Image (cartoon, rainbow, N blue to C red):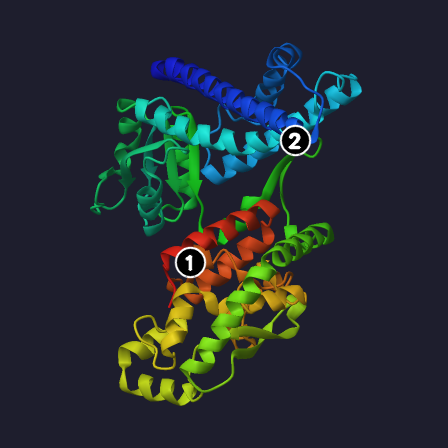
Amino acid sequence: MKNTDVVKKPLSILLLIIGDFAAFCVSFALAFFTRKYIGHIILLPKFIVYGYLSKLFWLPLVYFFFFSIEGLYTKKIHFWYELKILIKAVFISFIVCLSIVSIGKLTDFISRLFLFFLLFYSLIVFPIFRIALKNILFFLGLWKERTLIIGISPTSIKFAQSFNNNKYLGLDIVGFAGQTKEHIEGFKTIPLSHAKKITTALNINTIIIDENALNEEESSKISQELGFFVNRVIFIPKKHLIFLFNSEVNYLFVEKIFILSVKNNLKSLTNRMLKRIFDLFVSIVLLPFLVIVMFIIAVIIKLDSKGSIFYVSKRLGQNGKLFNFLKFRTMYEDNDKLLKDYLSQNEKARLEWERYKKLKDFDPRVTRFGRFLRKTSLDELPQIINVLFGQMSLVGPRPYLESELDRINDSIGTIVLTKPGITGLWQVSGRNELDFQTRVDLDCFYVTNWSLWFDIIILLKTIYAVLKQKGAY
């Protein structure tokens, strides 16, 4: 460990604990006064601040204990993953505190309603304080890790451009070491042979090995040589290895063998039931609002052009079963003829259609109002009916056409394990800007690595993607 880390790491941990304590105090105060205000309305027993402070001095210790166990003071991970861990730690802390109060017969002095309010405010206040604190720590240089990327490929370049100076990951990327002298805007590049020298000279904390740019032997050699000098090694795997994300490594002591276990999360009946319950809950909550919006859209469609309100097509559902896929109609009735004529006269558009099965700049088939519906993704709203009937999910793989089976190839067995989704990982990763094979790869990754939290993240990111209107056409 380098000398700078001896000071930086303990200091950053201390400041995170202080920040969490401040977040707890704010949550405590909000919960207390909410409970007090409601108590005046519905005539609950009165209580005073001093009494609560003297009886609940141990509460923050429970929070800090579980925060520490979950690695919230040491792990440098992406915001969404830290938020998941933070929510988990807050819930566990709440359950433990509620159990202590109930089993210890402290309910005469401590309101359980107060604890529920504390949970509610903690889930809001702690993430806000953490975002602010991580920004401060990064600005002060306490959360930064000088990082060198080994290997140059489009994947590692995109990674650097996206995550350099990310406040949560703490990556301060100083440059690339590669076998080519490719110029990368904003970053320095050095020969691969100088990687060890630069790592020690610049006190590099983290190295990122891009396996897309290196062969297996080079990757293994570099990780062993440089791993000794840095705090952590991050790998950017080749595309065909993404299924290892949801894997677990074990060592069999007697047999002296390493084994790698890979789970397929949506193969589990329990997970599929949990996903279905989540779909129904969200759909039913949103339905009253969506019915009004859908009625207005239906009227405008009829006024804008001739034809039906809905577009219905057969799509591949769970277990390969075909179902009627619903969308608002966005095209003219004679759309096939319009497309054929346009592609025969436009070579660039024909090549684009062959690659993406979409036309980005101009599609002659789409109506005036249809362009708006597609741009805002409002044409997808009728699929909520498919969700309620159990044919689709809110989040899932892309609803593929039967004619696309040959292009999906061996991945079809994984994709049809679950229901297709209104949105999915492919949609928040570029939508129509992705080529067909990348969409298939993302769908397979989603199915094997599914979690309820994954669905929540994708839904939130979908809202952001729709508002930005990026990749929609």
* Res. 410 in view: no
Q: Quadrant of the C terminus?
A: bottom left
Which residue sits at x=26%, y=23%?
201
Element at label 1: helix
Left or right of 268: which side holds 262?
A: left
Across and down, in percent, residue 51 comes to: 65, 11
Residue at image position (33%, 89%) is 341
Q: Give percent across and percent down for residue 335.
A: 41, 85
Residue identified by numbered label 1: 466
* Residue 141 x/y as whole percent: 32, 23
* Nearest to the observer: residue 286 or residue 77: 286
Q: Residue at x 52, y 34 (%)?
A: 124
- Count of all numbered marks drawn on residues in the image: 2
When the figure is inspected, residue 374 is found, relative to residue 83, above or below; the finding is below
Q: Is residue 443 above or below residue 135?
A: below
Left or right: residue 110 compared with residue 227:
right
Local secondary structure at mark 2: helix
The amino acid type found where label 1 is placed reads Val
User: Residue at left 57%, top 22%?
Assistant: 28
Q: Amino acid at mark 2?
A: Ile
The answer to which quarter of the image holds residue 2 is top left
Q: Are marks 1 and 2 in contact (CB under 8 Å)?
A: no
Label whose residue precedes the other's in the sequence (1 or 2): 2
Residue linked to disc 2: 41
Q: Quadrant of the N terminus?
A: top left
Residue 274 position in % (x across, y down): 69, 51
Give the class, few, some or many, for how many residues have Cα within 10 Å of label 2's Cα (few <14, many ≥20): few
Q: In the image, which disc is placed on residue 51?
A: none
